[in-house]
Amino acid sequence: MLELSGERRPDPDPRYGAYPQPPLGAGHASVAYEPRPTSVRQARREVRRRLEEWGLGERGDLVETAELLVSELATNALLHSATPFRLTVSAAHGVLRCEVTDGGPRAPRVLGAGRPPTVESGRGMFLVEALARRWGCHREGPGKTVWFELGTCACDGCGRRQP
């Protein structure tokens, strides 16, 4: 069970647990990584490369936010599951969706920003909750997939958290 701070919760709608294939012409990529520290950097680079390839690289805020949040999810996979993980990135209909699937059974928890300064970890999901339009976690056999969505257009309201 996810433990979250505050009133916000990930989208509980089961339709969003698994993500269907994006429509034809949309961006879609999936890359597997070994459980090595360099894999986090490679996952960040993959996100940037794909967004630039799909014509979304001009949105610097989108690229930076996606890189940061993918880095957090990949780091969690590395630290908490120590299994290979898969990054899946899709862009369609004004939404960028990033998923990290790993073999660990433990769902992520959002820990508050007010943690003591001596505690160096535990803020990654707080950042995901604060910056993503939506996010969630669902089980994948013995493991799980943690995902987030960002808006890809610069129009008013795009990319903001939905009530």
Image (tube, rainbow, N blue to C red):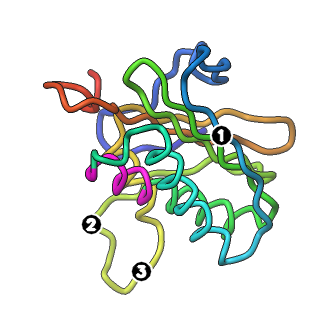
- Rate crowding at label 2 as few (under 14), some (14 to 19) or many (20 or more) other CA atoms within 10 Å: few
Amino acid type at mark 2: Gly
Choose top left, top right, bottom left or bottom right for residue 55.
Answer: top left
Q: Give residue 97's position: percent from left, percent from top.
A: 51, 34
Q: Where is 31 relative to 92, above or below? A: below
- Whichever of labels 1 and 3 marks the residue nearer the N terminus, that label is 1
Q: Earlier in the sequence, mark 1 or mark 2?
A: 1
Percent position of residue 29, x then y: 65, 40
Res 29 label:
1
Left or right: 71 with respect to 60?
A: right
Q: Which residue is mark 3?
A: 119
Q: Quadrant of residue 42?
A: bottom right
Q: Residue at x 56, y 31 (%)?
A: 27
Q: Which residue is mark 2?
A: 114
Helix, strand or loop at label 1? It is strand
Q: Which of 148/45 is in front?
A: 45
Give, as a single range, the part of the protein colored magenta. Answer: 60-68
Q: Mark 3 or mark 2: name the one nearer the start of the chain.
A: 2
The quadrant in which the N terminus is found is top right
Name the mark nearer the viewer: 1 or 2.
1
